[in-house]
Image: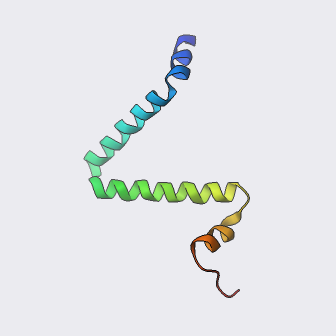
């Protein structure tokens, strides 16, 4: 079992990239290219929003960056 973790530490990027590529390939086959692209785009937007709220900026600050500030 230790050799597995050693192999994983040495080739982590290759292993994760291969699994991610396989996963995206299966999704494209099942749902089509544009639907898959939409899901990936939504995941990236969700990650960015989550990252912004985790870094204590808050959702309001994120929306102020994206949209012009309105009358409050």
Locate residue 70: give its quadrant.
Answer: bottom right
| Residue at image location 71% in from the left, 55% down from the top | 55
Residue found 51% across the figure and 59% down from its top: 45
Q: In the rendered view, does 67 fall on the left or right side of 13?
A: right
In the image, residue 14 sits, relative to residue 54, either above or below, namely above
Between 3 and 61, the one nearer to me in the picture: 61
Q: Residue 41's image quarter?
A: bottom left
- Work out whether 27 lies above or below 69: above
In-image side of 57 versus 46 (left or right): right
- The extreme right residue here reads 56
The residue located at (25%, 46%) in the rendering is: 29
Note whether 26 is above or below 12 in the view shown.
Answer: below
43 shown above or below 62: above
Q: Residue at x 30, y 58 (%)?
A: 34
The image shows residue 12 at horizontal and vertical percentages of: 51, 27
Image quarter in which the N terminus is found: top right
Position of the C terminus, as image quadrant, is: bottom right
Expressed as whole percent of the image width and height from the top left, the position of residue 39 reads 40, 56
Residue 37 in the image: state x and y as whole percent.
35, 55
Residue 36 coordinates in the image, percent (x, y): 34, 53
């Amino acid at each position: 079992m230790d050799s597995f973790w050693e192999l994983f530490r040495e080739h982590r990027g290759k292993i994760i990239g291969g699994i991610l590529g396989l996963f995206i390939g299966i999704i494209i086959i099942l749902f089509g290219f544009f639907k898959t692209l939409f899901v990936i785009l939504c995941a990236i937007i969700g990650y960015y929003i989550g990252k912004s709220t985790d870094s204590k900026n808050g959702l309001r600050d994120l929306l102020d960056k994206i949209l012009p500030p309105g009358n409050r």
